[in-house]
Image (tube, coloured by chain):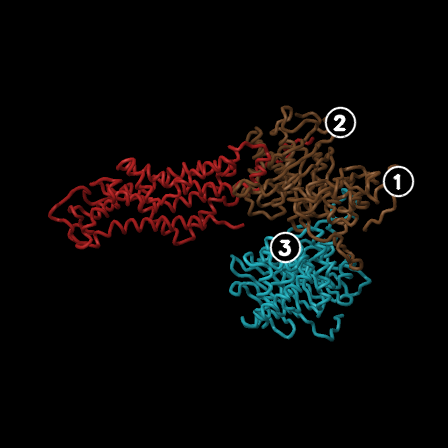
Chain colours: A brown, B red, C cyan
Amino acid sequence: MTLANDEVGGSTQPMLAVRGLVKHFPLKKDLLGRSAGVVRAVDGVSFDVFKGETLGVVGESGCGKSTTARLLMQLISHDQGELVFDGQTVGSNSLPLKDYRRQAQMVFQDSYASLNPRLTMEDSIAFAPMVHGLPEREAIERARDLLERVGLAPQRFAERYPHELSGGQRQRVNIARALALQSRLIILDEAVSALDKSVEAQVLNLLLDLKEAFGLTYIFISHDLNVVRYMSDRVMVMYLGQVVEVGDSETLFKHAAHPYTQALLSSIPTLDPDRRTETPPLAGDPPNPINPPSGCRFHTRCVHAQAICSEKMPVLAPAQHGQQVACWMHVAGAAHTGAPDAQGMVKPLEVAA
Amino acid sequence: MTSLNAAASPVLPLVYERSAGYWETVGRRFLRDKVAVGAALVVLLLMVLAVFGPWLAPMDPYQSAMLKRLKPIGFEGHPLGTDELGRDMLTRLMVGAKLSLFMGITPVVCAFFIGSLIGITAGYTGGWVNSVMMRTIDVFYAFPSVLLAIALSGALGAGITNSLISLTIVFIPPLARVAESVTTQIRERDFVEAARASGASAFTIVRVHVLGNVLGPIFVYATSLIAVSMILASGLSFLGLGVKPPEPEWGLMLNTLRTAIYSQPWIAALPGAMIFMTSIAFNLLADGLRSAMEIKQ
Amino acid sequence: MKPETSTPAFVDIRQLHVTFAGGKKPVQAVSGVDLRVQRGEVVALIGESGSGKSVTLRTILRLHAEKKTQITGQIRVGDQDVLTLSQDQLSRFRGRVASMIFQEPLLALDPVYSVGQQIIETIRRHENVSEAAARQRALALFERVRIPSPERRLQAYPHEMSGGMRQRAMIALALACQPQLLLADEPTTALDATVQIQILLLLRELQKEMGLSVIFVTHDIGAAVEVADRIAVMYAGRIVEEGPARTLIREPRHPYTRALLQSRADGALAKGQRLETIAGAPPDLTNLPQGCAFASRCKMAVPECSATRPEVTWLAEGHSVRCLLAQPQSNSQQVA
């Protein structure tokens, strides 16, 4: 397949279209077979990933971003919804799972646990190409070349074992491994979170270089909002298994529309000793996805919550600055005092900064 | 799209830095453990005895001499005395090593393969397959091993082959449990997930990623079972269910020397001492292996 | 010029060296740390892994295994010389004079007792009060750390609480006997962003209310700025720069501090612009170089840097740095 992959379906067709993903994990049943409930880890998530972009995904514990990553890689199967890659449904006859796996790969957070302690670095990297039919010699060649690309001299690192490398070096190997199949979509699940800041900077630079060199598309999951802002073109905010806001990265950081996004951004510690935070933007802990609140899931912690918020769940709709928001305050004609009226006139709104 | 097949590397042969592989490191650590090395030497000695015993032994193990029954240790021509039929103890102990060790090791080896197969399959597959397999195994595991061995031997009939079969069956459940438990742990690790994400089949993943990480701990556990197997085999022989006389086998010798315990207690204890020494050696060996394999990052 | 301190510092660490024997080669975790904390002051120790910040903290409570650790130097807290305390005196010191909160409450709290029981036990161990009185105090503590429904939560077990709640419970436990010094070892690192800011503000509040001295260890500069009055930057077991938070952030003088501040990804950077990185790898603590430990990675290093260990240079008020290239005048910046 050497056709210009980037142009499959044209530039407007998303590389990956996610529609209505749902994944519930059942809790253990008691003796009588009654289930204690389900963990609604991912509850109706839809978004697009466009060719060549970096889509950042942020959210706190319980928001479902890691589960979503695993669903995108099909490491767990979804209960409902579909994934469409380059216009073809993943898992269908036109795009069987094994072929999809050549196109999309993942880098995990724990650099040590991601590597087989018994395999050398080059063997770990060469494994996937060999699975897909590449002869061993060529696979090792490719592995060594990739090690070079990620900044690890093959002479020094190819025949080493994971415990001999530092965290940053191991993560580079993991990135090399993700590239071994010449995939176009790389999912980075907290890939730099466990690294020291100075090492993190090096790895982020590497990711940028590789993206340019290979024309990659990234899904960048992280809890570190600064890093996400720096790396991403667009950002998606998740809360309790749903997408609450998605849009251009700068727009989102400057004009966050959803109250949760605003609270999240205000929670970033300031670097200015004269302007310290005085009150926490959000009280309490992120709730448990076992029994999510009715209606809008954020309404229990939202300062702007009104009656409609607990009754009906809002869906993603266009907001003022071009992003998409799931909030009644941004739906024209909604029964919320903060919503624009039916003509789209936005009323002045006290937005907690 | 940039080609990844590097044609740009220099023509000079690159010297690649190697580091000690896993087993090399384990080997070195093991050799530093004096106790473990000592135990390994004893085991080696026993193996040599087992193989070459019949040639090394001074006399004929079956040659009885009714006039020289139960002579004490240090008796002329018989350094370890004679048994109840006048046969040389030293010879019988040396030749007996072969059968005793054979009865000890063979069931464990067979159970290792069968148990690992069951356990790894159950561990990797998970779900109801796992439940069915492991609960069936648990039924056998619930029986005390001695009783199970005796019951099976009794059902199958006496004789070496049958007791080997029954002992194998006794050891399959514990090995399967250990295999399943270790496999389940490994399966959760990120590198196995990454392997699944690369599109590899379950078989390939087990072969490349799971086996290398799992067989070690199972092997160590199996080594510790050899001592148990020897004792059980001796027990079966003692009860007449295993080896039949006049074959020299330590457990059987314990049985036939039972009555001599009042007249020649040292002689009667000798086969027991051999069993004891062998089990300790295997246990210490297993212990040493386990310590050597715990390489912390 | 060295600032004249009229009041003796509450915490005075001098020339602290901590070496761990036990491996093949001894690890020099801390190589000469001098630190002073006044009463009611919050000092943040920032650095990456291997900088020695956590080791320094734990040495104040003498938490390391006695046999494998060589400690030289002096640690004074109040009028007690911590390193010479007997075991008895030490157990009275811990919890009453100084106490500690950790990064992972699940590991620091006993899983088989309810949090209320743990607090009550701590109080009664140090003070002669009845169970009822101790319970009252535990309740008050829970209210102070803003745990909702405190009576109910006193009976909860650690695993039944959410991450933020557990951290609050741990803070309550640490403050149960009204210590004067609170040691915090990365307490917010494992928390979500919205919870982290709550805990940081809580710590600031409690610190002001109770007049606590706090030493706060973290790798996150942002968290340090939110809580600290002064910040000390550690590298390879030494403090390389120390000063008021404002000064250190606005005018960092040590190359490592600058590099740390510059390598942060933040919104000010243009998309696609590469981050400033610190070349090289963290130092090998079993084999520290003779000169400045940062020299091999420093963009501004001169040959002298690898030969001599830099002494402390006092810059402006309370701002010191260990760097051969730093000049005392705050106007002329030799360090570009």
In the depicted structure, whether residue C100 falls above or below residue B65: below
Q: What element carries label 1?
A: loop
Q: Between disc 2 and disc 1, whose residue precedes?
A: 2
Q: Are marks 2 and 1 on the same chain?
A: yes
CA distance for labels 2 and 1: 36 Å
Residue corresponding to mark 3:
C49
Q: Nearer the viewer, residue C17 or B268?
A: B268
**Residue A351 in sight here:** yes
Residue corresponding to mark 2:
A10
In the depicted structure, whether residue A317 falls above or below residue C216: above
**Horizontal side, residue B292 vs residue A92: left or right:** left
> At 68% across and 53% down in the image, what residue appears?
C297
Residue corresponding to mark 1:
A345
Residue C245, given in percent of the width and then of the height, sits at: 75, 61
Q: Nearer the viewer, residue A92 or C7?
A: A92
Residue type beneath disc 2 = Gly
Near mark 2 (Cα within 10 A), the count class, few <14, some 14-19 or many ≥20, is few
Q: Do the residues under discs 3 and 2 have CB atoms within 8 angstroms?
A: no
Near mark 3 (Cα within 10 A), the count class, few <14, some 14-19 or many ≥20, is some
Which of discs 3 and 2 lies nearer the camera? The answer is: 2
